[in-house]
Amino acid sequence: MDRVSLLCQLWIFGFRHALNVQIFIKMHRSDYAERQLRMMQQIDEDHTLTQLANAWLDLAVGGSKIQEAHLIFQDLSERYQSTSLLLNGKAVCCMHMGNFDEAETLLVEALNKDARDPETLANLVVCCLHLGKPSSKSFSQLKLSHPDHVLVKRVTTAEESFDRALQSFS
């Protein structure tokens, strides 16, 4: 096996484990996600995917791990150019730590990079609500460009339930 084939196999292997970490986090099985992360760390602890998976798991676990996730996102932002994904990661960490002003700054920076990114828009809606600022502009953009986003669906369902309850009192 040549070097390129080996590198490709290692990358695919790492990608598969990172995807598994995401899936287990979505299933609220951080124990399984942590096993996948340990396998990734045994292969290459400094690999970007390993670092991202570590930050995702730290965010899911919460508590004191939030600061560690923030440091990972910060390190990746310094090593590579700040992307919407990294800025969102740092912003979510800031929100978890109660620093909504910094989170808003990071999310506005992320919007400047990609004005239609659904996660940036959704995170900005949440951040603005915590800051007591209007969020209708961000929510309207999200609703227009990504009508199937989970936040849009939940708000729409809540509005419909409210309207039905209101009609029952009329």
Image: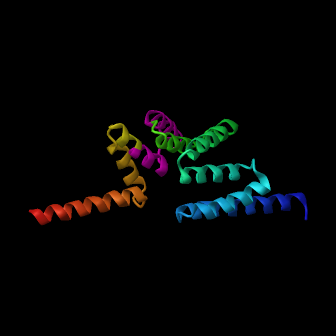
- For the point 54% across and 54% down, which residue is it? 60
Where in the figure is residue 96, as x and y percent of width and height? 48, 44
Q: Residue furthest front?
A: 64
Residue 164 position by quadrant? bottom left
* First to last magenta residue range: 100-126
Inspect the magenta stretch and tell me whether residue 114 lies in it.
Answer: yes
Quarter of the figure with the N terminus: bottom right
Residue 136 position by quadrant? top left
As drawn, 63 above or below 3 = above
- For the point 49% across and 40% down, which residue is it? 97
Q: Residue furthest left?
A: 170
As drawn, 73 above or below 33 = above
Quarter of the figure with the C terminus: bottom left
Where in the figure is residue 154, as x and y percent of width and height? 36, 60
Where in the figure is residue 129, as x and y percent of width and height? 35, 42
- For the point 69% across and 52% down, which residue is it? 49
Q: Nearer the viewer, residue 130 or 160?
A: 130
Q: Nearer the viewer, residue 84 or 103?
A: 103
Where in the figure is residue 50, as x and y percent of width and height? 70, 52
Q: Nearer the viewer, residue 147 or 98?
A: 98
- For the point 66% across and 41% down, which residue is it? 76
Q: Residue furthest right?
A: 1
Left or right of 95? Residue 158 is left
Q: Majority secondary structure of the magenta segment?
A: helix
